[in-house]
Image (cartoon, rainbow, N blue to C red):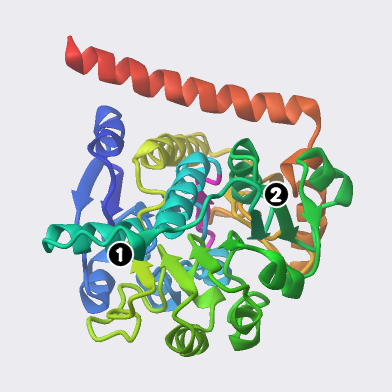
Amino acid sequence: MTKVLIADELSPKALDIFRSRGVEVDVRVGLKKPDLLSIIGGYDGLAVRSATKADKDVIAAAKNLKVIGRAGIGVDNIDIPSATARGIVVMNTPFGNSITTAEHAIALLFAAARHIAAADVSTQAGKWEKTRFMGIELYAKTLGLIGCGNIGALVAERALALKMKVIAYDPFVPIADARALDVRITSLDEVFSLSDVVSCHTPLLAETKHLLRQRHFERMKTGASFINTARGSIVCEAEMIHVLARRPDLFAVLDVTDPEPAATNSPLFGLPNVVVTPHIAGSLGAECQRLGRMMLEELHRLEETVRQGLPGGEQRVQLDARSAQSNQDAHQYDEVVRKPFDGAHLTAWRQPAAREEAVQRRTHPARNSVTEQDDARRRDERDHAHDRGSDLEQLR
């Protein structure tokens, strides 16, 4: 029987999807690395979110592993080269929680503008400090995006509906695509110096680690806010904290930290101009259900390939793939390759040059054909309809 290890919290519906197809599911959330190493060899599939690290040691110990599924967008917690070397498919759900994440960013935008968290604490303490929490009106204010890909574009659409102006730093989004969104592309320095609110939506790569430094935060306007729903390591946290401590007029609302979870003695905690949420921007469950279906399809395909002794087969991998030349936000990487079947499942994550060539064919959604966009939309509608049907069935 096929066995899947659920190493991070997934929705109960995702577990039901596995079990309905006869897959044995073990839920072992919060495993320490030695414990994970001791048991991973007995599983065909591994499902994670962002907490579990599938590093080279884990992959080396995973003797039977065929698929690693990431419920969400970023795959920076998975050692892709090691998985490739072992013939393990890595997949994510690049559109599964895009709207959820964008909505959370907008929620944090309001929280920053009106100091909601601090006002609640103050009021529940018996105070009535109306003049302390005046906040700002978002109308006609400028939102600066760092990354204007899938999630960044969704945030831009919602900010424009609030009658905000939107500018963005994203060197890989064509100017025409940005104009179609009514977004002006500019430099990273100008995003910080011109924006009333800066919101980060770029993936964590070697090129983006500690991209945001002290000099950027020092450029921020008086009373400006910084929002991060991407990855904590994109920011040099110590340098950001240094600026926030010296400039109480600035405000930071963070859904991500570096490391995660943040240490209980983190200098972030206790700063009056910082609000932190525990990496919940994409955590509503839809991406978990989609991941369950994707992993089942891949495991079933692999089993059929082995059973029928086919000389070859399609290896389909959906990855949040990036390189220095690829887009800087959450887009689907979906390439089909054909390789001789030699007993080990081969993935489409290959050498950087080939990877970049593939990514350039499939980068920003606005550059995809209408047919591809329609197909993606129909897949999402089908998934949502399936989920609604399951909910109605439970109510009956």
Query: Seen in the image, is 304 located left or right of residue 350?
Result: left
Q: Give the range drawn in magenta.
A: 86-94
* Residue 352 against residue 123 in the figure, above or below: below
Name the secondary structure under disc 2: strand
- At horizontal 69% and vertical 53% (from top left) the residue drawn is 148
Q: Mark 1 points at which residue?
A: 41
Kind of residue sitting beneath label 1: Gly
Q: Measured from the top left, where is residue 12 in percent x and y?
A: 23, 38
Q: Which mark is residue 165?
A: 2
The residue sitting at 46% across, 34% down in the picture is: 297
Height in image: 263 above or below 352?
A: below
Q: Where is residue 35 in the image (x, y as percent from the top left)?
A: 20, 73
Q: How many labels were placed on the picture?
A: 2
- Residue 141 point in image, percent of width and height: 63, 53
Query: Is residue 300 visible from the viewing direction of this image?
Result: yes
Q: Which comes sooner in the sequence, label 1 or label 2?
A: 1
Task: Check the image and name the residue furthest to the right.
Answer: 176
